[in-house]
Image (tube, grey):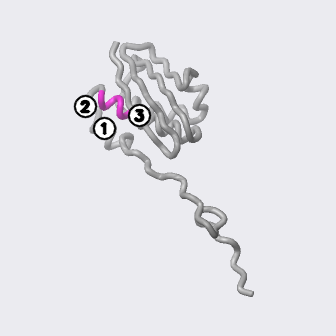
Amino acid sequence: MQVWSATGRRKRAVAQVRICSPGTGTIKVNQVDAEQYLQGAYANILKPFEKLQLDATYDIFIRTEGGGLTGQSDAIRLGCARALCMMNSEYRTPLKSAGFLTRIALKKERKKYGLKKARKAPQFSKR
């Protein structure tokens, strides 16, 4: 059994992805079935595999923490893409052109003193 592991990050979410081959096609996130855990964001994590037209011959075990479901699913997608590149270097070109190997660097901006939120100022009164 071969195992490839990679890490993906998005906002506050971190995902550690392990792809095992040969497998039966099971995908577990924090020991829970991925479809049940990620609900509507489940299709997002399968995109790298769909792009490469890989069938379900791999088992994927994922450990995530931090952030919300969208951030976690994007972190998982990045981790899966990185693990696939480790598996076969020829996968890098199509994954990179599809944007799956790009880390989304957007984060929540910190609140500044004197303001109500990061950029929202209190209402200005002329008099």
62, above or below 23, in the image: below
Q: Mark 2 Cα within 10 Å, few/some/many (few <14, many 20+)?
A: few
Secondary structure of the residue carrying numbered label 1: helix
| First in sequence: mark 2 vs mark 1 | 2
- Residue 57 location (% of width, % of height): 39, 17
User: What's the residue type where badge 3 is placed?
Assistant: Thr
- Residue 89 location (% of width, % of height): 25, 31
Q: What residue is pinned by disc 1?
A: 94
Q: Which residues are magenta?
A: 81-86
Residue shown at 40% from the left, 29% from the top: 49
Q: Is residue 124 left or right of residue 100?
A: right
Q: Is residue 43 left or right of residue 126?
A: left
Q: CA distance from mark 2 to mark 1?
A: 11 Å
- Residue 33 location (% of width, % of height): 57, 22
Q: What residue is pinned by disc 2?
A: 89
Secondary structure of the residue carrying numbered label 3: strand
Quadrant the C terminus occupies: bottom right
Q: What residue is pinned by disc 3?
A: 7
Tag 3–tag 1 contact (CB < 8 Å): no
- Residue 96 location (% of width, % of height): 32, 41
| First in sequence: mark 3 vs mark 1 | 3
Q: Is residue 123 magenta?
A: no
Q: Closer to us: mark 3 or mark 1? A: 3
User: What's the residue type where badge 2 is placed?
Assistant: Ser
Residue shown at 58% from the left, 38% from the top: 69
> Which of the pair 39/9 is nearer the observer?
9
